[in-house]
Image (cartoon, helix red, strand yellow):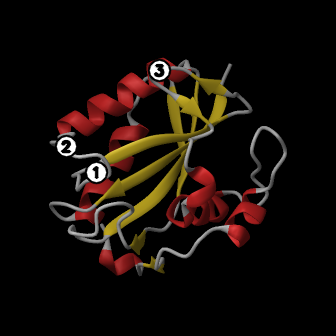
Amino acid sequence: MMTDVFIGLGSNLKDPAAQLARAVSALANLPETVLVAQSPFYASRPVGPQDQPDFVNGAAWLRTSLAPHQLLDELQEIEHKHGRERLRHWGPRTLDLDILLFGNQVLDDDRLTIPHRELRNRDFALQPLMDLKADLALPDGTAISKLRSQCPDNGLRKLPPADYP
């Protein structure tokens, strides 16, 4: 059975918009997975340490028959191929791929939390989700649009398509 899954994309190193574009291509080639759509890209201030470049973020809508942990493994492999190094919590990175929503599943274990633990506080994740599916909601029924209206401002700026491949 195919499940609708929403992936958050982020980068602030080595041509971030191009990193995200390549990541979307990699997502489209995952096994047992179809890329439904990708959101526009947005720039925003970093969360956490401010001594790093602004981030470029977006989201991808997938349909997959992979289980959540299988998908996580695939996403981490894509990050690795993009040179992701985990040197500092909330530090700079070439690529960050997060499972934001996985159907209506709720999961919290030592490797994975769905819905994403910080989704409510991330305008750079909520806005791309709204761009993909305006009526999207959390498993508990809370509308993403409601969360977005209550979310702190992180200097979110929509990038024109000419700024990314």
Q: Amino acid at mark 2?
A: His
Q: Where the N terminus falls, by quadrant?
A: top right
Judged by depth in the image, the label closer to the viewer, 1 or 3, is 3
Q: Position of residue 102 (x, y in %)?
A: 63, 33
- How far separated are the C-alphas under marks 2 and 1? 9 Å
Horizontally, residue 162 falls left or right of residue 129, namely left
Q: Residues within 10 Å of mark 1 (few under 14, many from 20)?
A: some
Query: Taking 11 as reference, is 3 above or below it?
Result: above
Kindly state the secondary structure of the residue where label 3 is placed: loop
The quarter holding residue 149 reads: bottom right
Residue in view at x 74 percent, y 44 percent: 138
Q: Residue at x 48, y 77 (%)?
A: 156
Mark 2 element type: loop
- Check disc 1 and report the residue beneath it: 22
Percent position (x, y) of residue 118?
55, 49
Residue at position x 43%, y 68% from top? 41
Q: In the drawing, does residue 73 fall left or right of residue 136?
A: left
Label 3 near label 1: C-beta < 8 Å?
Answer: no
What secondary structure is marked by label 1?
helix
Q: Estimate the spatial distance between the alpha carbons at disc 3 and disc 2, rounded to whole Å.
A: 24 Å
Q: Give the answer, above or below, for where 6 lies relative to 31.
A: below
Locate residue 22, reporting x and y percent: 28, 51
Looking at the picture, which amino acid does disc 1 mark?
Arg
Could you tell me residue 130's position as x and y percent? 66, 63
Q: Gap between marks 1 and 3, in whole Å?
A: 29 Å
Q: Nearer the viewer, residue 84 or 4?
A: 84
Residue at which label 2 appears: 82
The amino acid marked with disc number 3 is Asp
Point out which mark residue 110 bears. Answer: 3
